[in-house]
Amino acid sequence: MSAPTLRLTMAQALVKYLQVQHSERDGRTRRLIPGIFGIFGHGNVTGLGQALEEYGRDLPYYHPCNEQSMVHTASGFARAEHRLATLACTSSIGPGATNMISGAATATINRLPVLLLPGDYYATRHQGPVLQQLEHPISADVSVNDCFRPVSRFFDRLLRPEQLLTALPEAMRVLTDPADTGAVTLALPQDVQIEAWDYPAHFFAERVWRVERPQPDTQRLAEAAALLVQAKRPLIIAGGGVHHSEAWDELEQFAITCGIPVSETFAGKGALRGNKALLLGGQGTSGTPVAARVAEQADLVICAGTRLADFTTGSQSVFQHPEVKFISLNVCSRDAHKQGALPLKADAREGLRALRQAALQAGVKPQADYLRQVEGWLREWQSQIEKEILAQAPGEAMSQGQLVGLLNEEARSGDVVISAAGGLPSDLLKMWDARDGKECHLEFGYSCMGYEIPAGLGVRLAQPSGEVYVFIGDGTYLMNPTELVTALQEGLKLTLVISDNRGYQCIRALQVARAGHPFGNEFRHRDPATNRLEGEYLAIDLAGNAQSMGARVWRVSTPEQVRQVLREARAETRTCAIVVEVEKHRYLPASGVWIDFGVAQTSQDPLTQKLRREYEADQQQQRFYY
């Protein structure tokens, strides 16, 4: 007797399959893909659209305003769910699909699982070139969806309905693999979506994908313990892997047991949740001066769940101890071997537990003199914050640093602040106190402008309680405000705090530091005399724009007003937008960590020539580890 089958279109089978997939870790099971975002066009409306209407009762459909945004929403949701659940995203062919590519890159670089289902050309090709089809001169099987290949962790184009039988399990495997996860793209030709096939009924049985916690190798642990015994000035750098594995307690216990101060990457912000005496703040170029000081002198650096990007290492300039060594705890083998590190390939929680036990057995103890010195540096930094950042400068508008401090004071346990691009992520990395449950979600792996609002929706979907603060600059807001409409449609409350400094001021600061002159980074009218964008500042009504899309809005300019409206916004049930006028060219104190942003090798400008000489001298700080 033949096994029972179900005759379904490929799209219908896809929808039914997604509704019975679950993830499990530590005995807790949840839906792997509990919803789908999509914008319909001729590449997916008659296939996936029809399937969702008929078979998608348990796969809620959400209607965003922009294809890139819906991928960011999936990323925000996945991060809030510690990568144990994500959302699917479907688009038409052509521009609908390619709009998702920036979102795919953001997800993959940040190691966040998202499932992308772009429509594709007709597999039969009987129709001739279809609307939005790319005609490649030498490759007839290429479509614009091939652009997804380099930014996806898994890519497949399904040319037959039965190919779902192998493609979907592989997609689920990658989505739930801690080392290999990222964007998964299944390109769906529009004619194949509506083609029927007799699928085995057991294909639609519920399936649980276990998210494993790999254990560290015992010999590597012994070697790591030996390094800890020898170290006089150790440092822990905590990355996003600490959050993904929910290893906060293990990080704190290891740090306390061994007496090791902790700095945090952008993705790792908030990893150390309790012990203030050991928390150095942000690591690297955008971090705190005290973290830079400790890293410069460290003789052993324990990297926990970080891929060590250039902002973290100061383009390989921050670690200056002549005999510095590295231990790298990472679930990904490639990251575990960076910096010539002793690799501990393991889940962050399990690795930190094992490393603490190995350190105890080896007799590792805190070094009082070292910790007293670090404590003194932390006091100096706190004093600098109070005197130089939180204090009001005479004759100026409030600073962006003051705004960060005010929001931090008003935030409560269970609140989340989200930021991604511009100067705000750096300011939050330096200043935000994420202890006591005030979470901080910084996307700086791709530093993708336009991430913040849609990611806020994803966080809100995962976290119904608490405030979700979208902390965003005016330039980033203007790139992608339209998901406020989705927030209105779904009744999802966000609180936008828009720092209005009239342009891309952090890039202007970089430009002045490396080129010597500002050019093209502020919102100004064109000056008829110079034919350049250096006239008067534009009058842009950001609050009016947000109000037109359903938000309650405020325009404020003083600390007292900020405090008042943050309290009013907390009591509001709909999305809020607070537009805050801040000083345009005032920045937080620098970390003192160099980064390799080059200067023109040749120029007739004496200032640029001087900057080039300084840059070449600074390059001598770079070191390389093998």
Image (cartoon, rainbow, N blue to C red):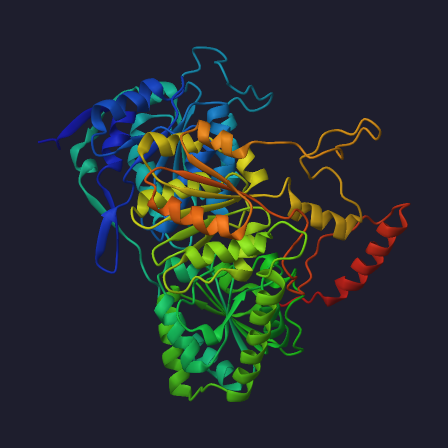
* Quarter occupied by residue 595: bottom right
Q: Nearer the viewer, residue 583 or 171?
A: 583
Across and down, in percent, residue 414 comes to 34, 56
The answer to whether 20 is drawn above or below residue 311 in the figure is: above
Q: Nearer the viewer, residue 290 or 3?
A: 290
Residue 147 in sight: yes
The N terminus is located in which quarter? top left
- Total numbered circles: 0
* Residue drawn at 32 percent across, 42 percent down: 461
The C terminus is located in which quarter? bottom right
Left or right: where 417 falls relative to 517? left
The answer to whether 226 is drawn above or below residue 457 in the figure is: below
Q: Nearer the viewer, residue 565 or 116?
A: 565
The answer to whether 57 is drawn above or below residue 504 in the figure is: above
Across and down, in percent, residue 207 comes to 21, 45
Across and down, in percent, residue 242 comes to 41, 62
Residue 216 in sight: no
Across and down, in percent, residue 262 comes to 49, 71
Q: Nearer the viewer, residue 373 or 265?
A: 373
* Residue drawn at 43 percent across, 67 percent down: 272
* Residue drawn at 50 percent across, 29 percent down: 545
The answer to whether 428 is drawn above or below residue 492 in the figure is: below
* Quarter occupied by residue 66: top left
Left or right: where 378 falls relative to 583? left
- Please, which residue is most extreme toward the top here? 127
